[in-house]
Amino acid sequence: MLTSINLLTGFVANLAIALLIVRFIYYPVRQNKNYVFTFLAFNTIIFFVMSLLTTVDLSVGAGFGLFAIFSVLRYRTSPMPARDMTYLFVLIGLPVINSGLVANSAWSSLLIVNVAIVAVLYVLEQGWGFHYEQSQRITYERIDLIRPENHDLLLDDLRERTGLPVKRFEIGNINFLKDVADIKIYFDDSRQRGWTNDDVLFLGHVEETAVSPER
């Protein structure tokens, strides 16, 4: 039987773990205010919903309730990045687990589960033992350097102008009318910078929607 004291204790413990994950693991890397609001709001409401479902004998109903919770994720908005979606799933699953453990007064299991989740997320976010290769798309205006014989000069120019340890690149679309080319650069980085595939870096003088070389 879930008592008021257990409910309050479970809520405080669940919210504390959620705040620890969001504030000290997720936020230092992403710093997205909108997702911080979503994570904590989802976490709080799902904890109370699942706590209510565990007070009555509704095993099938609880399953449908959980299914309905996850179906809410199908927002008609721009896609959420994979990393942010992962955090959202973690913070949705966290109150589901905690509410069940609190209902059964399994405090030792509650501690073990939450410490394990926080530890795994922290280790993964710090990148310990992992090697990351970052990529970034740029619009490049020095069209003369895209020739195969000038690729070494192009690589040096990309490193100098971006300040990144670029190790390779891929040349995409080339527009000879506007003297620009789309280039995707790759570089090693032990920490994720939070870039998405839609981010584009423009090198050169921007004129309207195109990039043209300085005359």
Image: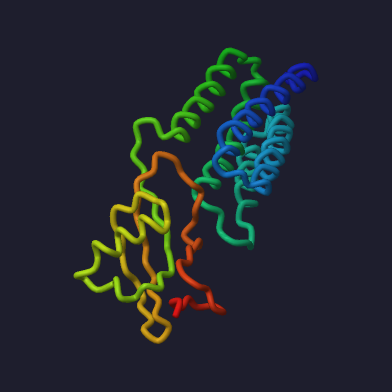
What kind of colouring is applied to the model shown?
A: rainbow
Left/right placement of residue 170 relative to residue 74 reads left
**Number of disc labels:** 0
Q: Quadrant of residue 37?
A: top right
Q: Nearer the viewer, residue 127 or 149?
A: 149
Residue at figure coordinates x 64%, y 31% from the top left: 18
Furthest toward the right, the residue is: 4
User: Is 144 displayed left or right of 118 in the figure?
Assistant: left
Taking the image as shown, residue 14 lies to the left or right of residue 143, namely right
- Which residue reaches farthest bottom? 177
Along the viewing direction, whichever of 138 and 80 lies nearer the viewer: 138
Vertical side of 121 occupied by 212: above or below = below
Q: Residue at x 56, y 58 (%)?
A: 79
Q: Is residue 62 above or below residue 8?
A: below
Residue at left 71%, top 41%? 41
x, y percent for residue 14 = 66, 26
Most distant residue in the top direction: 108
Q: How far across and down, in percent of the image, does residue 98 sit?
A: 63, 26
Q: Quadrant of the N terminus?
A: top right
- Residue 193: image location, x then y, percent: 48, 47
- Please identify the residue farthest to the front as the structure is shown: 215
As drawn, 130 above or below 195 = above
User: Residue at the spot x=34%, y=39% of the render?
Assistant: 131
Observer-nearest residue: 90 or 124?
Answer: 124
Residue 34 % position (x, y): 68, 49
148 w.r.t. 168: above or below: below
In the rendered image, which quarter contains the C terminus?
Answer: bottom left
Q: Quadrant of residue 147?
A: bottom left
